[in-house]
Amino acid sequence: MKGMGNMGNLLKQAQKMQQDMAKAQDELVNIEVEASAGGGMVTVKANAKQEILNITINPDAVDKDDVEMLEDLVLAAINEALRQAAEAAGEHMAQITGPLKGMMPPGMNLPGM
């Protein structure tokens, strides 16, 4: 029954990887990124769970006659922060899922792969 030992070992490895993935997902909250727009007029901080943590607006960016510019700067900074957050999350999760890359059937994706 040598094959059964290999199956048990494979199941243990899968369980460990699942635990490692859950831990890595929990750690995403601790990975922070920061993006700015308008030469630093608007700065957005987010975590790798893609949660916005802070928005800072330089008072010089506030012009009551051009609110659209400020809205565009805020939007650009948020989108860049979220892009960086997604990239950071993918890199972090790839540390766990990396060995499986290329082994998954087409269309089946795990975070970070």
Image: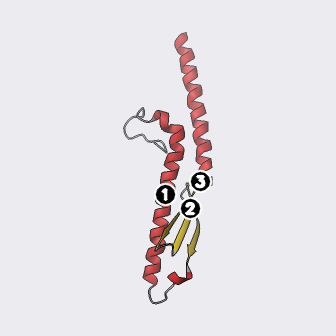
Which of the marked residues, 1 or 3, is nearer the chain's N terminus? 3
Viewer-nearest residue: 17 or 40: 40
Query: Callout 2, which amino acid?
Result: Ala
State whether residue 2 is above or below residue 9.
above
What quarter of the picture does the C terminus occupy?
A: top left
Q: Secondary structure at mark 2?
A: strand
> Disc 1 designates what residue?
84
Q: Position of residue 74 (x, y in %)?
A: 49, 73
Please tell me which residue is depicted at 42% across the width and 40% down the height of the picture: 108
Is the residue under label 1 in contact with that under label 2 (CB below 8 Å)? yes
> Disc 2 designates what residue?
46
Q: Position of residue 13 (x, y in %)?
A: 57, 28
Mark count: 3
Which of the marked residues, 2 or 1, is nearer the chain's N terminus? 2
State whether residue 7 is above or below residue 61.
above
> Disc 3 designates what residue?
31
Viewer-nearest residue: 105 or 38: 38
Query: Callout 1, which amino acid?
Result: Gln
Please tell me which residue is depicted at 47% across the width and 42% down the height of the picture: 110
Mark 1, Cα crowd under 10 Å, few <14 / some 14-19 / many 20+, is many
Mark 2, Cα crowd under 10 Å, few <14 / some 14-19 / many 20+, is many
